[in-house]
Amino acid sequence: MKGTGHETTGQPCQDHHAVKLIETGRDEPLLLLVTSDGAGSAAHSEEGSAAVCEETLRWLEMRLSDGTAFLTEADGVSLVHNLRTYLLNYAEEPERQYAVRDLACTLNVAAVLPQRAWFLQVGDGAVIVQSGSSPMEVVFWPDNGEYANQTYFVTDVPDDRIHTRIVESELDRLSLMTDGLLSLALVFQQRSVHAPFFESMFRGVEALDGVDTGAYGQLQAGLSRFLNSPGVNARTSDDKTLILASQRPPVKAVPIQAVAATPGEGVTS
């Protein structure tokens, strides 16, 4: 969703996301989630974030669709190197002729199977997970480097700042977000999750019995209104993207469901 700061300056929304639920060759449900936030200082970062989301989803599907082997920590570097090449080729197309830095953007990725998950982060933004009665936790703390307003981007991130983690357990709840929501979602002094921000929204997702229902549409609209509410906009003027996924009861119609706030377009799954 376009932030009020960008509304004021006339900048485009620089956030994008991708969500897809597929089945592997072993008939396992595989949930793929991606968020990306374009750098405010980069001339065409909204194109970069959109391209990165699309290419990340394609790369993950190609890598995981047969179900023979899951992702490793080394795949994080491989994916980012692939994205950098993809952006370089995109920038050099005759109709563009951009500098690749014009496409700078962050990246958060989750690939989730029933009993394991793989996560990747470049830059800020955050991934939140919860399993059973355990508290919500941040998979990676937002990576702002040495200075408060600094972060890292896919176009030039050093390999040692490409963060990858594998979780070998079932996750009940999962959320990805761009940095526009971090001040509401995280407790920075304790480096922890502000659980009340998420709880009612997760319960709304868990009450759904499918994606092609009136309740699903109402939840989409309600989430979009919330992200554009005066209370939220008073805390952040940045673009805002939020993905929520849960497989807790009473959801029984499908293995897992996801709902996401789409910049400028409402909500999709």
Image: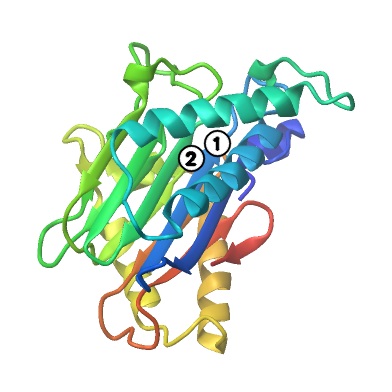
Query: Which quadrant does the C terminus fall into?
Result: bottom right
Tell me the distance, in whole angstroms, between the alpha carbons under discs 2 and 1. Answer: 9 Å
Q: Which residue is mark 1?
A: 37
Residue furthest right in the image: 95
Establish if 108 lies above or below 62: above
Which amino acid type corresponds to the residue marked 2 in the rendered image?
Gly
Q: Which residue is mark 2?
A: 180
Residue furthest top in the image: 146
Establish if 263 lies above or below 224: above
Which amino acid type corresponds to the residue marked 1 in the rendered image?
Asp
Mark sitting earlier along the chain (2/1): 1
Establish if 191 lies above or below 40: below
Q: Position of residue 46 (x, y in %)?
A: 68, 35
Q: Is residue 229 visible?
A: no
Query: Circle 1 — which element?
Result: strand
Q: Position of residue 63 (x, y in %)?
A: 45, 48
